[in-house]
Structure formats: structure tokens, C-alpha cells
Amino acid sequence: MKRNHIPFNWPHMTGKELDHIAEAHQNGRLAGDGPFTAKCHGWLEESTGCQKALLTHSCTAALEMIALLLDIRPGDEVIMPSYTFVSTANAFVLRGGVPVFVDIREDTLNLDESLIEAAITSRTRAIAVVHYAGVACEMDQIMAIADKHGLAVVEDAAQGVMASYKGRPLGSIGQLGAYSFHETKNVISGEGGALLVNDPALSLRAEIIREKGTDRSRFFRGEVDKYTWQDVGSSFLPGELIAAFLWAQLEESVRITQARLIAWQRYHDLLEDLEVSGWLRRPVVPQGCVHNAHMYYVVLSPEVDRQFVLDSFRSASVASVFHYVPLHSSPAGLRYARAHGELEVTVSQSERLVRLPLWVGLSETQQDHVIDVLRTAIREGRRD
Ligand SMILES: *Cc1c(COP(=O)(O)O)cnc(C)c1O
């Protein structure tokens, strides 16, 4: 880390990663689905209550498995926010599916459940929700809408590890959920992810799709005497070295989350006055949602010039970023998807959002500096 530079993210290591990797090396078992993968699966199943957890290369891979599991066909529509990472949409587009973007709520920036029903057509197959910043979508209402119309619910819980909705871990509520262990997330393995299967009818097929379309997992369990090509599939599983690394992180996931929550709360307390005076709004965590401090963002008031704020951070050597360029207005989104309505909230919020550095080990001094820079930038960047 360069002196005086505050990075946006700094991957936290628990100290056990290399020990576990050495053990995997010693075991001589390097391919996927070895003992460390089994530990990770057990942890995920126990802590989320999902029917079956399967490690994947990435959350992107888990979402691609989901599109295969749901048999998404050309022309099938999947309702989702435009304010999300590309993988939510790409997974379905790869199968010929059509993302239908619905606007988000102004408070949580999650899919606006009150707008979903009007976007349902005879081609709609699924609702893909994204739990932005580890804060849950309004799942009771979304599940009820899906039930009423016979749709599947997919949870892109890439940002939602260790977060919950009314006591239920994110990723375990819809038929299928996807986690990310990418370096920029809370619990990490460099690249990595998991598929959570909650509908028992899908779990055997999930194993087959993940193992190149074969029943190799059943063969390993001694349930069949040879394994054969059963279905479509690909290679979606990570090797054991990745699982060994991830196991060190999962073991410490409570502590990692606690440390992030402390930094998150400190930003939240110190920025209250700027919200009271109307210069920005802070994240909202609705009742019943337990979040995981995946990110701290502020939405600047329209009177504040965001570019000026971002430039001020850059000159002060603070790495802050914004996201997402809404998918409906990006080149591939225009080609492969369609928007339901004007998506006014998506457009206005995405133009005003700024993310602040947040990682385990971010010091109070560093946080104070970030806030000082933000305060000065808001004072000097007012468009009045
Ligand atoms: C990070 C992220 C992904 C992709 O995760 P990978 O593990 O990098 O594939 C997908 N969706 C959302 C909402 C994300 O934040």
C-alpha cells in the first residue's frame, strides 16, 4: 500500500490461507470437490439452510448455472434491475433470454417490488433480484408475486454473504441463489462463488450441470458404478487450492463481517449531519434486514457536482468509485434487453452515487481523512 494513499478495497487475509493451501498441496488432491470443497459446502449449507451448496469459479458461473437449471430458452424474459453488475443479465442472455429491466427503490436501490407485476408478460420465466450492498430486497412480496404468476425467483446475492432478511440468509429464499467470493467482496478467494440450491428438485441436476453434464458426483458417492454424460453442462467447479483459501475465510466470516460493520457504522454516524443538512443521503437498511457492511455509499444531492467530488478524492489520494452504468443504457443492454418504463430512479441515483473506501483494517484516521475530503468537496462543489 502506497503511503498516504487510501485504496478503495484491500483484500483481508485471515492468516490461515497458506496453511490450508499447504495442506491441500500435501494431500495431493488438487482437482475440485476434495476435502476443502466439502468443508466449504458444509459451512454454506449449515449457515444458510440451503438444500445444496456448490462452489463455483465465480458468482458469474453460478448465475450461468442458474440459467441452465431454469432451462431459459430464446425469448424467455427475466425481470431484473438495470442497476446491477453485468453478470446478472449476461447469464440469461447467453441462453437467448431477454432481461426486462424494472426500476429500483429510492431507499435501498433494490428492485422496486411494486413495479414488478406490470412488467410480467406471457414470456416471463423468472425474477432475478439483486441484494444491493448486502441489504435485502422485499422478499416476502417478491416471492408472493412469483408464486401467483408461476415464476422462479433467483437471488443474485453476490454482495449478500452473512446478510439476512427476516432471519433468513440471503441466497436461501428464492429457488436459487448465487454468492461471490471475488476479491472485492467480503469473504474472498480471489475469484470464486457458490450456487445455493433451495428447491430440492433442482439439486441433482445442479451437480450434473457443474460436472460437465455427467453424474460424476453420484459416482464419487458410490451411488452409481460408472459416470456418463447425462445432460448439458460445463466445468463450473474450482480446484482445491481455491477452496482451501476460501475455507480460511469462511472460518473467520463472523469476525470479518463485524470488523466491516464497525467501519460502516462509523461512516454512518459521522455523515449524519450532512444528511440532516440535505447534502447527501446515507444508506437505508429497512427493518428486518441485517446487512453485512459490504459497501458504504452516499447519494449526493442534485446540487452537488459528483465529478467535482470524485476529482477531489483523486487529488487527495483517496480511491473512491461510483457504479453502475445502468445496463439498459449500455451498448449490450440496448442490444439484448429491454426496459420496462423510464427507470427514472435508476438513472437519477446512479448519477449521484459515490462509494467510499471500506475494508477490514481501514483505520479511523483514514476514515476521518475520507470524510474531511468529502465535506470540503461538498462545500466547494455546490452548484449554487
Ligand atoms: C460481484 C458481483 C457479481 C459477480 O461476481 P463474480 O464472482 O466476480 O463473478 C455479480 N453480481 C453482483 C451484484 C455483484 O456485485
Image: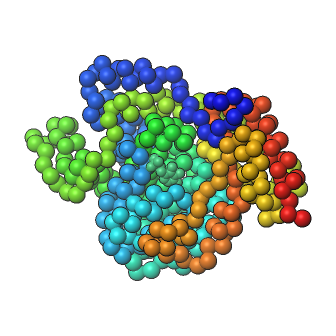
Residue 214 shows in this picture: yes
Quick one: 242 or 230, which is closer to the camera?
242
Q: Quadrant for residue 340, please give it.
A: bottom right
Name, please, the residue furthest toward the front.
Answer: 315
Q: Residue at x 38, y 33 (%)?
A: 243
* Residue 1 point in image, percent of width and height: 63, 30
The color scheme shown is rainbow
Indicate the position of residue 184 as horizontal and vertical percent values: 54, 42
Image x and y of residue 201, in percent: 30, 56
Query: Would you place residue 11 above or below residue 231 in this image?
Result: above
As drawn, is 112 to the left or to the right of 217?
right
Which quadrant would the C terminus be assigned to in this image? bottom right
Q: Is residue 53 visible?
A: no
Work out whether 362 lies above or below 60.
above
Task: In this rendered view, identify the residue nearer to me: 219 or 102.
Answer: 102
In depth, the one of 156 and 316 nearer the eye is: 316
